[in-house]
Amino acid sequence: MADPGTVHVGLIGAGIGPSLSPALHEREASALSLAYRYTRFDLDALGVAPAAVGDLLARVRDAGLRGVNVTHPVKQTVLAHLDELSPDAAAIGAVNTVLFDDGRAVGHNTDWSGFAAARRTGLAGTTLGRVAVLGAGGAGAAAAHALLVEGAGTVDVLDVDADRAHALAVRLATTFGAGRAVASPTAALGDVLARADGLVHATPTGMAEHPGLPVDPAVLHHRLWVAEIVYRPLRTGLLRVAEAAGCPTLDGGLMAVHQAADALNLFTGRRPDTTRMRRHLAELLDDPEPREDPRAG
């Protein structure tokens, strides 16, 4: 059982051994003078299939945890095992944070709020008329939702899986109105970016395990801002070529910090210092650890 004097939370996902979330949460909790413990529940290490995540969720709730973060591959699978969803989590169709409250499991999504805060902070003053989102997975869905909440006129959704892009565009249009989101084939990326104000990259391409560029540098232009979801490394190949093209850029570190801060706030009721957390993240990224795949796509 959890120590009643300690806020005990965790992370459920597969292959999460290198995750920075425990250290990021615990460092900030210590700075806030909170007794706080963050435990990994790795599906691979535990031999738990993603389809059985409901049983694991019940076990950690019964053990007295305050809540858990949820990551790949169960951000959507876990929905069937929750008692309630926040409005934004319901609209996005995925959760990354589950709060246990009076025996009920309530799903939240701080990926979208984390991206929204990161964009406001790191790309202040940029235009939101038309934005392309490359990658229609959980992170892309959260970023697209955030863009439309923040007032983007239209979001173009692109994904190598055309059906997934179409499904996300339909979900967004249902929530925000016809024409606010459209699906486009990845082959049309150059044409889409020619008329776009911004690009959000939400696939794993550019990480150590997934080297390369997600777009042809020739389609980037100085009127376009570029935001990354990937944060390991902070300066991806995409950001380097975007900067060379004169694009304002945003690395994935700010989203990682703000989504973690929002989750920590849900768990504890305390508002973290995101500037301090950004320093924590920079220090952690200097550590000689394996790179984590956040399964952005």
Image (spheres, rainbow, N blue to C red):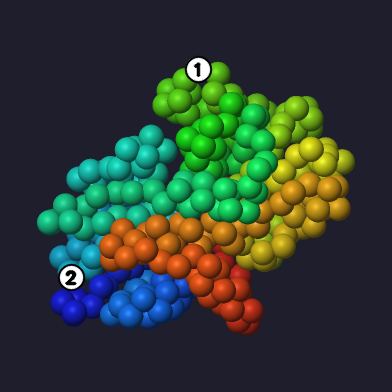
Left or right: where does residue 9 sit relative to residue 209? left
Q: CA distance from mark 1 to mark 2?
A: 45 Å
| Outermost top residue | 178
Instruction: For marks 1 and 2, give the one nearer the viewer.
Output: 1
In terms of depth relative to the viewer, which is nearer, 132 or 94? 132
Answer few, some or many: residues within 10 Å of disc 2's Cα (few below 14, many 20 plus, some between 14 and 19): few
Residue 73 visible, this orientation:
no
Specify the quadrant that holds the N terminus: bottom left
Left or right: where does residue 286 sit relative to residue 100? right
| Outermost front residue | 125
- Point 65% across, 49% down: residue: 123
Which amino acid type is shown beneath numbered disc 1? Ala
Q: Which residue is mark 1?
A: 178
Which amino acid type is shown beneath numbered disc 2? Ala
Q: Secondary structure at mark 2?
A: loop
Residue 270 visible, this orientation:
yes
Residue 244 pos. (x, y %): 86, 53
Q: Is residue 208 above or below residue 145?
A: below
- Point 46% across, 57% down: residue: 259
- Point 62% across, 38% down: residue: 133
Residue 46 pos. (x, y %): 34, 70
The numbered mark, 1 or 2, whose residue comes first in the sequence reads 2
In terms of depth relative to the viewer, which is nearer, 172 or 71? 172
Q: Which residue is mark 2?
A: 63
The tally of labels here is: 2
Residue 60 pos. (x, y %): 23, 66
Q: Is residue 73 above or below residue 235?
A: above
In terms of depth relative to the viewer, which is nearer, 141 or 197? 197
